[in-house]
């Protein structure tokens, strides 16, 4: 019995020694499926490695809340088929009769839009749909619906579409008009280059951008969130997923994003939306003048102490301004008692007036200040380019 015990003890000792040697020299023999590391690394036994969990910065909740309301917009335009020259041949007409070219659908554009109402109203850019004869929208969940245009406003580059008969449409939540600040995080959602629904992140780089020559009425949000072709009409949302703007344009030398993108603020978009849904169009005041900046040099030449105001460079014949006695060379300094700092302010103030309303224009002519009563006219709607 003692001898068997000694043999057993020796066998165990040898086995332990062999396992120790193999573990030191050839560990892969003992764990053939375990990854072999060639670098000394630290592996955590638990997900946090014994360190308290640190909250991750994520905007997934904002994306989940807003992305379903962003749609892809496909447009088509009806074009006439090319006429075969044989159609004009008398012998051809004798055997085959008169032949007419048949119209066909030609794809003409692709962009994005935002569902702003569960009733099916969609905001997008005017330039996305302005030449379209057929419009189709595709939701994030794969559903596709034909859409019809309710109205458009070329002067802000906005348009309103309507999807009829669709159930359970996801509508986005609109942010407060004055909530946005420079430095706030924003997400741009759209369909760039047709690759599919895409989200990019950045900050608000600037507010109230004007003089960009993108549209007549400009009050753009500038952002460095990547906006590319196909993003037009898509959503710019805040970190909570609320709509703060409609992506519209980029500044680019190459055609791609360079970190300077522009979006129409939700306050302006909402005003246009409500007018179009109510009346089918946007109505603005108009007086029929051409205006320009009043530079210090021009102010001095006109004998005006301050360079604040808008110079009337031209007056349209038969316009409300001409009937009220406004002349080229007059400087508009106030409107209904409110100071006018420049052409942008004058344009916005006149546009906000209702056609038929009487307004008091304070102008400086020579060394005199005149108060002229002007009956506001209706601003003409730009023609639809075709």
Image (cartoon, rainbow, N blue to C red):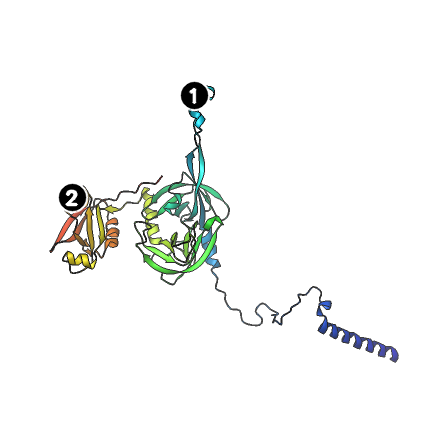
Residue 323 appears at what percent x and percent y? 16, 44
User: In this figure, what is the number of numbered marks?
Assistant: 2
Which part of the image, by quadrant, shows the C terminus?
Answer: top left
Mark 1: secondary structure:
helix
**Residue 240's image quarter?**
bottom left
Which residue is outermost to the bottom?
2
Which callout, 2 or 1, points to the residue nearer the camera? 1
Mark 1 packing: few (<14 Cα in 10 Å), some, or many (20+)?
few
Residue 378 appears at what percent x and percent y? 24, 43
Q: Which residue is mark 1?
A: 90
Q: Which residue is mark 2?
A: 323
Mark 2 packing: few (<14 Cα in 10 Å), some, or many (20+)?
some
Asked whether the beta carbons under mark 2 and mark 1 sit within 8 Å of each other, the answer is: no
Mark 2: secondary structure:
helix
From what the image shows, is residue 36 above or below residue 385?
A: below
> Residue shown at 48%/64% (left/top)?
57
| Of pointers 2 and 1, the one earlier in the residue sequence | 1
Residue 246 appears at what percent x and percent y? 38, 52
Which of the pair 197/7 is nearer the observer? Answer: 197
Residue 26 is left or right of residue 321, and the answer is right
From what the image shows, is residue 327 above or below residue 16?
A: above
Residue 340 appears at what percent x and percent y? 21, 56
From what the image shows, is residue 145 above or below residue 335?
A: above
Residue 335 is left or right of residue 86, and the answer is left
Kindly report the distance in space between the C-alpha atoms of the residues bearing marks 2 and 1.
61 Å
Which of the pair 290/59 is nearer the observer? Answer: 290
> Residue shown at 30%/45% (left/top)?
282
Which of the pair 221/169 is nearer the observer? Answer: 221
């Amino acid at each position: 019995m003692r001898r068997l015990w000694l043999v057993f003890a020796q066998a165990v000792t040898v086995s332990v020694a062999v396992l120790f040697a193999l573990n030191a020299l050839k560990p892969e023999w003992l764990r053939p499926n375990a990854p072999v590391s060639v670098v000394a690394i630290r592996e955590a036994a638990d997900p946090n490695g014994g360190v308290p969990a640190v909250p991750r910065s994520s905007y997934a909740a904002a994306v989940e809340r807003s992305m379903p309301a962003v749609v892809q917009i496909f447009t088509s335009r009806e074009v006439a088929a090319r006429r075969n020259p044989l159609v004009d041949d008398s012998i051809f007409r004798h055997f085959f009769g008169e032949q007419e070219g048949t119209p066909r659908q030609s794809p003409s554009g692709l962009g994005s839009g935002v569902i702003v109402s569960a009733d099916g109203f969609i905001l997008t850019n005017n330039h996305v749909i302005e030449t379209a004869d057929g419009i189709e929208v595709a939701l994030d969940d794969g559903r596709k619906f034909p859409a019809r245009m309710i109205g458009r406003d070329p002067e802000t580059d906005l348009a309103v579409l309507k999807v009829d008969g669709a159930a359970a449409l996801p509508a986005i939540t609109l942010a407060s008009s004055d909530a946005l600040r420079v430095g706030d995080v924003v997400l741009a959602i759209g369909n760039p280059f047709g690759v599919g629904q895409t989200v990019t992140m950045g900050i608000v780089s600037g507010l109230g951008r004007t003089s960009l020559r993108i549209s007549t009425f400009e009050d753009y949000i500038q952002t460095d969130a990547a906006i590319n072709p196909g993003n037009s009409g898509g959503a710019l949302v805040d970190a909570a997923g609320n709509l703060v703007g409609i992506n519209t344009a980029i500044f680019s030398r190459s055609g791609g994003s360079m970190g300077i993108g522009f979006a129409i603020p939700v306050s302006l978009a909402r005003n246009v939306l409500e007018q179009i849904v109510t009346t089918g169009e946007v109505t603005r005041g108009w007086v029929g003048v051409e205006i320009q900046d009043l530079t210090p040099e021009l102010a001095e030449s006109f004998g005006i102490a301050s360079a604040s105001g808008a110079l009337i460079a031209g007056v349209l014949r038969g316009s409300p301004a001409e009937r009220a006695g406004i002349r080229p060379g007059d400087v508009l300094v106030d409107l209904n008692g409110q100071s006018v700092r420049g052409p942008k302010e004058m344009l916005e103030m006149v546009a906000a007036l209702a056609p038929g309303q009487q307004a008091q224009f304070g102008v400086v002519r020579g060394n005199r200040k005149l108060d002229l009563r002007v009956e506001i006219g209706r601003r003409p709607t730009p023609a639809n380019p075709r």
